[in-house]
Amino acid sequence: MSVNNRDPLVVGGVIGDVLERFTRSIDLRVTYGQREVTNGLDIRPSQILNKPRVEIGGEDLRNFYTLVMVDPDVPSPSNPHLREYLHWLVTDIPATTGTTFGNEIVSYESPRPTSGIHRIVLVLFRQLGRQTVYEPGWRQQFNTREFAALYNLGLPVAAVYFNCQRDNGCGGRRN
Amino acid sequence: MTQVTMEEVWKEINLASIHQHRQLNIDHEPVLRNQNPNNSIFQDFLNKPLNKEPPPWSSSTHQGSLLTPPATVISLNPHPIDTHFYKSARFGYSGKKRGQDSDDSRGDRRHKRMTKNRDSAARSRARKQERAYTNELELEIVHLQKENARLKRQEEQLKMAEAAQHQTKKILQRSWTSPF
């Protein structure tokens, strides 16, 4: 189903700030402990210290997928001049499996926002085939769109995001 | 992390005042030090030969990289975007130079504060909207599950009724005796 205007990805600005409009075609299930991530869910850094379980759909085991996890609101949503921060990058995930079967190019770094409420986005792309993806030189100022173009990943096949703020207060303006 | 000498810091500052929006991480990855402004850093990366050697992944997170550079560059970089950024009291600095407290800059600051506030309010409303949408969907799910259960029960009953009727039809009975 295509992303409509009431879709949380649109309302939350993920479509636009990070991704182009796309049509969901593969199931993406992200779980931190017992909590399944649904769009816009509020999760604290203490709950996401370790990488989540990620299960993807699809049917053909010969299809491979890439998972990107970014924070577009760095260092703060009101001034995101370091957009995006790459938290995790896993490639060569076979359909119907999960990230444990893939190739972790960039290790999981748990989000620790200091200022404001950040969106953390997980995007799934379909690869043309098994491919070598070179990790970027650094995590910040990553650009998901450009990354997808560079490796011919096309439009996303699935995406989900959640909101994350500091454990004690959102670290707002202090003057 | 390499120690930065005073000369290097001054060189950075001079370059900063010329360029528009400089990457501020002085003692971050060395590759950034002599880069061009703005997103050309990423473009340079794309044009460079592909990196075969995995670079050492520094454990510094995005906030870690923020804490180190501004101390040396901040009050000498006149760029408005950066002063706006440095207003964040996290660093304990006010972005403006001391002698600039005219009505003009006050209005300017107020205006910036207003826009920031407006954006923050918009994001807040968006989050609220999503929560409402999610709740709506959850209610819809419960409603559909109940209706589904009801319809299934109904179907079962109809099936049983039909089967029972079928049973009775098999047995021919004399119900009325006719005169002939």
Image: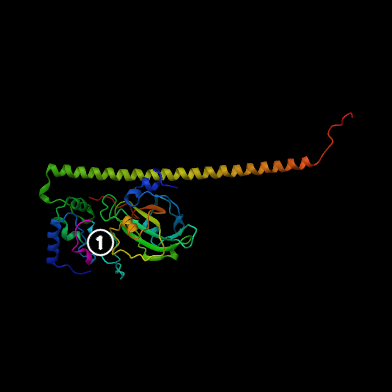
Nearer-the-camera pick, A156 or B132 = A156
Q: Position of residue B78 (x, y in %)?
A: 14, 53
Q: Residue under mark 1: which chain is it in? A: B
Answer with left or right where residue A97 lies relative to residue A112. right
Nearer-the-camera pick, A112 or A5 = A5
Q: Position of residue A158 (x, y in %)?
A: 42, 53
Residue at 13% from the left image edge and 42% from the top image edge: B104
**Residue at the spot of label 1:** B65
Q: Which residues are magenta?
A: B30-38
Q: Is residue B32 magenta?
A: yes
Q: Position of residue B159 (x, y in %)?
A: 68, 43
Looking at the image, is B103 positioned above or below residue A132?
A: above
Q: Position of residue B114 (x, y in %)?
A: 24, 42
| Residue found at the very far left of the displayed protein | B99
| Residue found at the very far top of the displayed protein | B179
Q: Is residue B96 magenta?
A: no
Could you tell me if residue B112 is visible in this image?
A: yes
Q: Quadrant of residue B125?
A: top left
Q: Quadrant of residue B1?
A: bottom left
By secondary structure, the bulk of the magenta-drawn segment is best described as loop
Answer with left or right where residue A31 lies relative to residue B111. right
Q: Amino acid at mark 1?
A: Ser
